[in-house]
Every structure is written in structure tokens, then in C-alpha cells.
Amino acid sequence: MTAPVVGIDIGGTKTAAALVDRVGRVLERREVPTPARSGPGAVLDAAARLATDLLGATTGPVGVGTAGTVDPATGGIRYATDSLPGWTGTPVADALAARLGRGVRVTNDVNAAALGECWAGAGRDRAHVLLVAVGTGLGGAVVRNGRVEAGARGAAGEVGHLPAPGAERLRCGCGRYGHLEAIASGSGLAAAYSIETGIRVTGRTVADRAAAEDGVARRVVERAGSALGAALAGLVALLDPEAVLVTGGAAGALLPAASVTYSAEVPAGWADVPLLPATLGADAVVVGAARLAIDRPDIGRTNR
């Protein structure tokens, strides 16, 4: 089959859909703000409208990368944060299949990003990859033999909940303290800066202030990057990937310090495993979702 396919990215802030060809190139793209506060039905309706606008003469299933933990057996949401209120328990695969009249395959958005990067991005031609997404929170995905490792609950690769030195006073998105996400993420940068200065700003603002030579902001960013680099060095020894990829809105700010610490801490046997910036940017999830639609029935559910 040579027809392009549709990939969908459902996030707490935006929902996007793209028509993707069989070598991973985005041909057309649509995006709208996610109507998260209007409930799961409105979110699914928005995603279906975007996809319908692109389906045309395409055949086969649609792929979806979504925020939340996806049940690999059903394509439904096992758990989601308040960025998508009521999303936990939503039968995404079944509900979108009913709206679109065709099969839908669903995985977590970070898993989809990993598939996209391994197909058409920085992980191309690599069968074993660890991808970490550094945004408001911190997510991860493990690719083995070209396939995302889903785990027993669809939650394998959640690196954000590893214990991290330096994060003891910082609250993770899961509600506990001391996790890697609590220090090495946009929300972690904001929290750490607030503790040191009493000033509440966004993680992006902290990164901007660090680049502008704000001493406190630089210290916060460097500490976060070092924590990330040390954790990734340990994970390389555990998972034995060919490369580690870092993506997300806060990745650029953290990568310099992360790279220094990673190089210093990675065990000698894995010294040739590179730490690389991902290259697909905002298209990673839709491209990976399209890949899922083409030939990844082992992840998520095929409905029809």
C-alpha cells in the first residue's frame, strides 16, 4: 500500500492531525486548541473533525498519540492528569472508530514521538532507542527491535518517576516528592526558581532568564540538566540503547548541562551511546501515530 495515512496528536493544550506519506513526510497538517475543559466528548469531536478533513481517499486505520497512559489491550485511557479533565477511562480507540468509520490504533503521545523519531527523525535506522520528552512534565519511551515497549500496563518508559537527588523539596506531577520530573521539567524549573527567589514564573521564563545570565535561573537550569544527564547515564546501562533522544519544549534549555553530566557519568561500556536532540519537533507525535497506523498492531487496539 502506498496511500498516505492520518496521524493524530491529542494533548492538553492542542490537538493536531496530519496526512503523512509512507516515508514519514508530513503532507498536510491541521491543528486546533484542545477543548479540554469541555470534556472528553468535545476533545474526541475535535480530533475527529481534523482527521475527517484529511482522510479523503486514504484507506486503513488512523493512528493516535494521546496524553495519558493507554491500555494496550483496549486503546482506552488508564490514567491521565488534570490537563485533560475526565480523560481517565475514555475509550479513545472505540470512540474515534465510531466517529471516523474506520479502525483506530492508539498509544501514548511519547511512545508515538519515539516511533516517529525512529522512522523519520534522529533515531532513523536505529532499532534500540530511549526517548525522553522534557516539557511541562517528563515522559519517556523505550524502543526495542523497532517497537515501543508497552509494558504490562502500557506505561513502560515513565522515567519521570525515578528518584532524583536534588528534588527532595520539589513535588512531582504524580503528587509525590523527589522524582526526576520534579526537577528536570518545565514545572520543575518553575518550582525550583520560586523556592529560591519567591517569584512565580513559568519554566520557559526561567530558561529565558538563564540564557540572559540571571544567576539563580542559570543555577536552576544547570541543576535540572545535570539531574537529567545523570539519570540518563544510568538508564543507558539498564536498557542498552543505541542512542538516547531528548525532545520537548524544555529540552533545549536542559541539554547543555545534561550532555556534560551524561558524558561524565555514562559507564565506559556505553560511552559510544550518543545523547542527541530529537529532530521532528512538533510533528513527532503525528508522524509516529501515522507509523502506528501503518504497521504497529502490537501497540494499542485495532477496532475494525
Image (cartoon, rainbow, N blue to C red):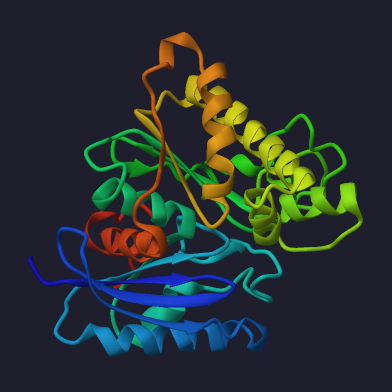
Taking the image as shown, residue 157 lies to the left or right of residue 204, namely: left
Quarter of the image where the N terminus is located: bottom left
Q: Is residue 153 visible?
A: no
Q: Position of residue 72 (x, y in %)?
A: 46, 55
In percent of the image, x 58 and y 31: which residue is there?
A: 229
The residue lying furthest to the top in this view is: 268
Which residue occupies the foreground of this view, 225 or 240? 225
Q: Is residue 172 left or right of residue 292?
A: right
* Residue at the extreme left: 1
Residue name at image x 33 percent, y 58 percent: 288
Q: Pick the residue in front: 85 or 123.
A: 123
- Residue sitting at 40 percent across and 62 percent down? 285
**What x and y, as percent, mark residue 210?**
68, 49
Q: Tell me if residue 273 comes above or below residue 171 in the rendering.
A: above
Q: Quadrant of residue 52?
A: bottom left
Residue 214 in picture, x, y percent from top left: 74, 49
Whole-percent x and y of residue 254?
A: 59, 43
Residue sitting at x 55%, y 30%: 232
